[in-house]
Image (cartoon, rainbow, N blue to C red):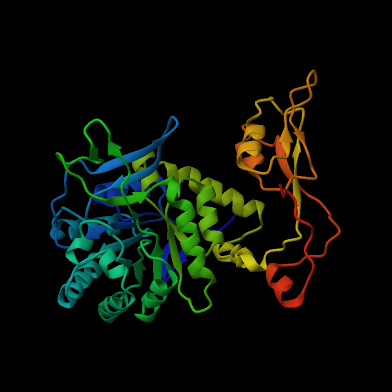
Amino acid sequence: MANLQSNTAGIISPNPFWLASAPPANSGDQIKRAFDHGWGGAVWKTLGQPIQNVSSRFAGLHYKGTKNIGFNNIELITDRSLETNFREIAEVKKSHPEHAIIVSLMVETKEEWQDIIKRSIDAGADGLELNFGCPHGMCERGMGSAVGQEPAVNEEITSWAMEYSTVPVLVKLTPNVGDIVPHGLAAQAGGANGVSLINTIKSIIGVDIDRQVINPRVGELSSNGGYCGAAVKPIALHMCASLARDPGFKIPISGIGGVSSWRDAVEFILLGASSVQVCTEVMLRGYRVVEDMIEGLENYMEEHGFEDLGQMTGKAIPSYSNWGNLDLNFETIAKIDADKCIGCYDCVVACQDGAHQCLFPAEEGKKRVPVIDESECVGCNLCEIVCPVPGCITMEEVDNGFAPATWNEHVNDGKPLRPKKGAH
């Protein structure tokens, strides 16, 4: 049986699935229930000077009948007293000692950091997460992403935490930057044991077009919020991989952003994460989603021969290269399984209007299966993407007689490239 135990910067949990610092990790009773369902760890909702939140504070992005492909919030840190939070942290650690409790923190002065770090550790924290990512409200007060967007400030405050902490420290990075790598390196330079990413993306999720007010509405006003949920996963994967592949970055990663299933978790782990944090999917579906995640990850590891998470962490990073290193002579063409085709012609429309005009309707009187002009097919994948029938359209590799050649090799060494297709 595969070993799912996770070690992220010295924070040990029975599996890599952690609750992210958010409403699902707001109280001791919640986290106890989460641990009972199988969550390996929880990052406690950010502690600091308690604030008053607004009503309303959440909004969902719905698309063509599918609800909540994206999610937005304008909620801030804890609105409960520090004394209450610390008491509940101690209670949860006592009742669930094998599970990891990571306490998220956000304060301003060095003295405040010293005090809240000591109190968190005294309460039983297995690790700390410095919230340098919140993109609304707190950044306007000089915290959150206001820190995370300035590498020098990130490094300095991280160094304060490392001076005072006796447990591992993770720095939670903001995605609201042009390049994540300098910010991960700043956390590392400050002595952080690891990083977690991404926090939410600064966004306006939509407008109430009847009232002409941005959502979520607070009276007749609103504000930009933090975007999360399944739709942000590609951005989160990119930033996770960008750090993991950087030769100067040496510390562990806890991956966050759009994790909705075990498959999503596997992708983050293959791109360098040793644990994954989940928020939106729990808010929409409840704590029990972790049961399928654990079962799916375990089955995947056994099917692919991974005995532990360490063997699969970062396994896909070598495949992440610069565009100039891609083989321009590699070629695929579309193939249609006529027995599976339902004749919807979605692929024909997509190819004709959005790709390279190599798919055409069947001849009159013949079965309604699109015809492919293979000499014009560039293997772009669009037809496969829009096809509603799994496995009906596949992209098949073809031998075109040309040796592998990249753009860099072509420019530097004169390696020949195959003739272009689709030149109209």
Determine whether, in the image, residue 424 is placed left or right of residue 90: right
Please, which residue is most extreme toward the right here?
Answer: 401
Residue under the point 60% across and 51% down: 300
Vertical placement of 219 versus 419: above or below?
above
Return the residue nearer the eye: 400 or 76.
Answer: 400
Q: How many marks?
A: 0
Return the residue nearer the eye: 336 or 417.
Answer: 417
Residue under the point 74% across and 30% down: 370
Determine whether, in the image, residue 416 is placed left or right of residue 311: right
Image quarter in which the N terminus is found? bottom right
Vertical placement of 322 versus 288: above or below?
below
Confirm whether residue 274 shows in the render: no
Determine whether, in the image, residue 141 is placed left or right of residue 251: left
Name the spot of residue 199 as percent of width and height, x first.
35, 58
Residue under the point 31% across and 52% down: 226
Determine whether, in the image, residue 334 is placed left or right of residue 76: right
Please, which residue is most extreme toward the top here?
Answer: 365
Residue under the point 78% across and 20% down: 364
Please, which residue is most extreme toward the front here?
Answer: 424
Tell me which corner region of the image, top left, top right, bottom left or bottom right, holds residue 187: bottom left
Confirm whether residue 47 shows in the render: yes
Return the residue nearer the eye: 305 or 74.
Answer: 74
Name the spot of residue 415 as percent of width and height, x first.
78, 71
Tell me which corner region of the image, top left, top right, bottom left or bottom right, holds residue 394: top right
Vertical placement of 151 versus 353: above or below?
below
Name the spot of residue 100 as percent of width and height, x first.
36, 61
